[in-house]
Image (cartoon, rainbow, N blue to C red):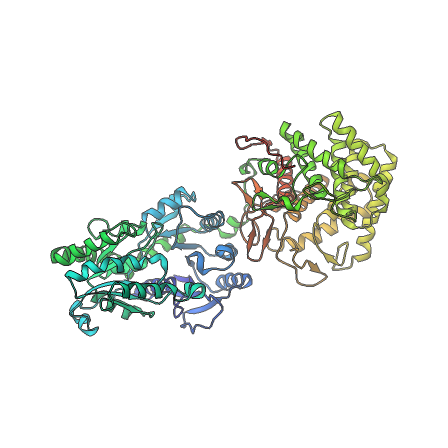
Amino acid sequence: MKFVYIGTYPPRQCGIGTFTNNLLNSMTRSPKVKEKKHTGIVVAMNGEDKEHGYPEEVEFTIKPELKSYIQAAKDINKCGADICILQHEFGIFDGNDGIYVLPLLHRLKIPVIVTFHTVLNKPSYNRKLIVKEICKMAHKVVVMSNKAVDFLSSVYKVPKQKISMIEHGVPNIQFNHKQVKQELKLENKKVILTFGFVSKNKGIETTIKALPDVVKKHPETLYIILGKTHPNILKSSGEEYRDYLESLTKDLGLENNVLFLNKYTDQQELFKYLYAADIYVSPYLNVAQITSGTLSYAIGAGLASISTPYWHAEELLANGRGKLFNFKNSKELSNIFLEILDKPEILKNLREKAKEYGKKIMWPKIGGKYILLAEEVLFHKPDMQAQKEQIPDPLKLQAFSLDHIKTLTDGTGICKNAKFAIPKLSDGYCTDDNSRALLMVLMAHKKSKDPDALKLASKYLSFIHYMQNDDGSFRNFLSFNRFFSDEKVSEDAFGRTIWALGYLLKNPPNDAFYQIAKLMFFKAAPCFEKLKSPRGIANTIMGLSHYLKSNMFDEAMQLSLKTLAFKLLGHYEKNSSLYWKWFEPTLTYDNGILPLALLHSAELLNNNNITKAAIKSMHFLTKLTFSKGYLSPIGNKKWYNKFDVKSSFAQQPLDAMVMVLMYQQAFKLTKNNDYLNKLYVSFMWFHGENDLRTSLFDSETKGCCDRIESYGINRDQGAESSISYLVSHIAVCEEFNIGLSIVSMPKVQETHYS
């Protein structure tokens, strides 16, 4: 077999890199596996894009930018490897919480085994989402403790049959205890050792504070702290923690009993210190340590080990292999030191049990377990492309919920923005969002008859009525204290309002709603012919189309629709060319609304030129946004100038929504099932079928995150994004004949901000 390993790698100074190197050697270079002729190459995480002078097995490196991750996936797919083994630790990958690893994994065409070095029991929303997505794409996941198996199963809902527990490997490096003590000039010392990167969470001060009573009885005691300060700590606070430890040592009069070795050692030198030590101590301050390579090494070297009861330590030191003491309890630790040093038989017993267990976790045996796991994965290897191209079952949709919309809505209307899921009142309200919200709740009420949707509709309709000017146009922005905060009338906001009002006139829930919508719609009608913006025109066409479907004999509105449709067609004919089938020289935001409006016009006007322009522009947009097999909308960061590079980031939920509606209307007109498939794939953009392989829907708040950025997901959940998600959800339910049963959280007292 040929393996490809993804992780950090020596000479970069990193524990994960050492692990990756040992794993590769144990699977491809160990005498026990030579006859199988396994080979391996490495894709090294390059950190800050430094030159590390990698050995020959490192064939590819990944720089801290998304395009490098995507290129790595292409390189792996071409390298002839049978299986990929990825080491996962949040800190070694880029993007928010290492999110860039998701698009890499998604693009791989070979099976993947992922080793988790950290599994949190109380992860942040983002970290939980990332781990769950990794586990979906991995064929097997490996953890190094039974506690981690439980967490993956209970917290992340990973099927247990997908999880393998394989212990942390230990190098098969051995020295003679007495000889190495002499070599290091420690033969007259009782050596206590802690090694690894130095940082505050290691709790080294607990051990130093435990030493005075020990030294009184055993003055030959020497506590060695072997390791450099963690690079991230050096960046943020320099040697502050090491200086504190050295000052504490001096204050306690332990200068002759504590030795700081501020260096990063290779494995040969490290194991000399391990075999020279009598006792290993791991005084971590936090229980949430699921894997400890340092403690595994100590056990592998047959050391008498003492540790605080963090998760991995409880398992490693069970059955008499070591002793535990409570966090920060220096007195308890001091008593254990004295017990072990006073009674050599206890020390001997601990060392023998550790050594016996250590034989089971030497790297050649651990590497063999990984080989067996890889063989199992390849034996049951699925069709990778079929797996990735499969359309998810529409019946597995999340329950439709208006809870976040209710959170954003007060007595005035729906708040424009949110900070995370909390309304950002300082940004006030806008007609744009209240019109979108009105359209969405009317669609929901039509399908579900939910009374809460109607109550919300009343608030949004009232807001829109308040914002209409005497000439029929609409102001867009209203501050929280109800002052108008815009001078210029937005054609986009005008068009979206007409869309909502036209839909209401076609689907009135009661006569009161119908009458006020009619009043506003016809008051605004003289403004139709003045529209110039393609999106203002397109949104207005949407409203006219809905209105005319129930008022087909209104000749004045038929004329307005025809006028606006030909205006939009004029934009298309002016800018369209052989290779550019679009309405403008640039694709910007809300792009799908333009072909969507022509598709609705085509349904009513039966004009061949309009129909052709609608289909051609839709196919042009599809080619640009579906080139990867899933929806990748034009990013709003730089947009897409004619024949330039498409902007990938600041992708907006609004763009996904109009794609859903565009394919819905195309399917209604043509009955072509390909449009139905694209409708659903566009909707799945919200649920992780996107460039970052990450869901924008927040299952806790029932809101939708605002956009996909280069660093990850912008987790603010404003009105536009959440409404876009819900409109798309309703459209999917309509086309797949799924009932829309609105599910709510337990009701709380309604809050009125104004």
Q: Nearer the viewer, residue 629 or 275?
A: 275
Can residue 31 be seen here?
A: no
Q: Is residue 101 above or below residue 487?
A: below
Q: Is residue 306 above or below residue 555?
A: below
Report the residue that reaches farthest toward the front: 251
Report the residue that reaches farthest toward the top: 511
Q: Is residue 65 above or below residue 667?
A: below
Q: Nearer the viewer, residue 561 or 270?
A: 270
* Residue 192 percent across, percent down from the top left: 22, 62
* Residue 408 percent across, percent down from the top left: 61, 39
Which image quarter: residue 7? bottom left
* Residue 301 percent across, percent down from the top left: 23, 62
* Residue 558 percent across, percent down from the top left: 85, 38
Q: Is 168 displayed left or right of 232 in the figure? A: left
Q: Is 166 displayed left or right of 522 in the figure? A: left
Instruction: Residue at 65% x, 58% y: name it.
Output: 637
Instruction: Residue at 81% x, 53% y: name it.
Output: 571
Q: Quadrant of the C terminus?
A: top right
Can residue 119 be seen here?
A: yes
Q: Quadrant of the N terminus?
A: bottom left
Which image quarter: residue 697? top right
Q: How many marks?
A: 0
Q: Nearer the viewer, residue 89 or 574?
A: 89
Q: Is 652 displayed left or right of 279 in the figure? A: right
